[in-house]
Image: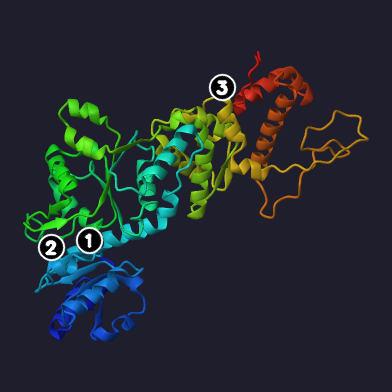
Amino acid sequence: MNACNILVIDIDPQRRETLSTLIAFLNCHAVVVKDMESWFDSIDDLNDIALALVGDCGGSSQTKQLLRELVNHEARVPVFTLDYPQNVTGEFPGTIGALHYPVKYPQLSNALQQASVYKNQAQNTVETEPLFRSLVGNSVKMKRVQKMIQQVSDSEANVLILGESGTGKEVVARNLHYFSSRREKPFVPVNCGAIPGELLESELFGHEKGAFTGAITARKGRFEMAEGGTLFLDEIGDMPLPMQVKLLRVLQERTFERVGSNKTQKANVRVIAATHRNLETHIDDGRFREDLFYRLNVFPIDMPALRERPEDIPLLIHELTQRIEHENRGAVRFTPAAIASLCRYSWPGNVRELANVVERLVILYPYGTVDFDDLPEKYQIDGEPLTEVVTAAISARPETSAALKVVVKENAASDSVAPLNGASHSDNGAIKMEALPEDGLDLREHLANLEYLLIKQALDEAAGVVAHAASRLKMRRTTLVEKMRKYGIQRDVEIT
């Protein structure tokens, strides 16, 4: 186990010494606080604390005050209490468990592992939350989803998010939480399909020490961790029937008990559920309770599959590449031909599959440009026409509009064919551009983007007549038709 700092707060010197010795066996350093009045002053940086053990601080009121300051600190220190009852620690969601004297090596080791998981989850939530709120898409279906989020986010209604795997159901759930009055409280996700049925009850409701074999410490469940906030139950369709009964009771009564305890606790939690299953079919097959379905399905939101909104793919690619750059994991650019090909693909894995493809291409072509031929073979789809909406989305994507700035310069003395709007010719016929950006540009991508836009403009000026557009571009008609197919440009007129 890696060396780390464990904060020890207890007025009993014998217990402090025993804990310090035990911590040393874990290859960790004990940061001991003796003076309760100035305990914060003795800690240089709480971000360096992997776990805090809080014992007797001189009375219940002092302990409550100290716990309140600890769990509300921006460092989000994981806290285990020492021999304090639930009525003290239960008020503070940051306390994730309790240990009892005499503390043994397995107990402390297990507590440290739980603290590590807790802190990693807290840090990941803080760092990725702004990115998760990016619900990208200008399509009609995505605007409908965005409107529904706006309508229901600040209510207390249970929401059921439906959609195929990889469509972004958790992104919707995080948006609902972020724009609600509970945004300052925890957002706690649980994948019901990834946890064995026999452990799911303990995961959701927590357990007391000794409740079952291996329960060497008391542990909070996800309902307690989400107190005052939002609990996201992903893949609710995979929840076993016995657990469905217990979940229904919590949703109806707003109370629960830890495994191994007869003490009832209140649950001030908003529940958002999601599934890729057809729950109505599951109800007919006896695999899902109808009463639970109606309890969860107060406000359903359907997430569209990516193949149903191909016009959002250029924006999604831009968002994904920007995110990778923001995380300093590389960069890549796509030509219009490559994006057009990706827009033709059916995406059975939806946005998750698209994100994986973009990340793979960042690794294969670091700081380069991906053209049609650079795509993995299964994503090279040529010849199928794209709709005008998709074509417009490709030409309007941020990197195209930012990269192509052509200077208009009239040349009245020239007897040659007039330049296309937005471009000018020098004395030798070359198109003049603005000065190169300070950080340079990718020539292959720039030329592909320029060719794409000039073909589109020539076709517009020729009212869609391919032969006239080819004449404007001084190329053979068959060559122009081939380039139109390459870039996914479709006209309302025949091009044969």
The quarter of the displayed image where residue 105 is located: bottom left
Task: Mark yes or no: residue 303 visible.
Answer: yes
> Looking at the picture, which amino acid does disc 1 mark?
Gln
Residue beneath disc 3: 385
Q: Nearer the viewer, residue 462 or 109?
A: 462
| Mark 3 neighbour class, 10 Å CA radius: few under 14, some 14 to 19, many 20 or more | some
Image: 247 above or below 93:
above
> Looking at the picture, which amino acid does disc 2 mark?
Thr
| Mark 2 neighbour class, 10 Å CA radius: few under 14, some 14 to 19, many 20 or more | many
Residue beneath disc 2: 217
Percent x, y for residue 99? Answer: 14, 68
Image: 273 above or below 64:
above
What mark, if any, has residue 114 been given in the picture? 1
| Mark 1 neighbour class, 10 Å CA radius: few under 14, some 14 to 19, many 20 or more | some
Q: Are marks 2 and 1 in contact (CB under 8 Å)?
A: yes
CA gap between label 2 and label 1 equals 11 Å
Earlier along the polypeptide chain: callout 3 or callout 1? 1
Image: 17 above or below 109:
below
Q: Report whether 372 appears left or right of 430.
A: left
Task: Mark yes or no: residue 373 visible.
Answer: no
Image: 160 above or below 43:
above
SS state under label 3:
loop
Percent x, y for residue 77? Answer: 29, 68
What mark, if any, has residue 98 been given in the picture? none
SS state under label 1:
helix
Q: Nearer the viewer, residue 179 or 361?
A: 179
Q: Are marks 3 and 1 in contact (CB under 8 Å)?
A: no
Percent x, y for residue 343? Answer: 51, 30
Percent x, y for residue 414? Answer: 91, 33
Q: Quadrant of the C terminus?
A: top right
> Looking at the picture, which amino acid does disc 3 mark?
Pro
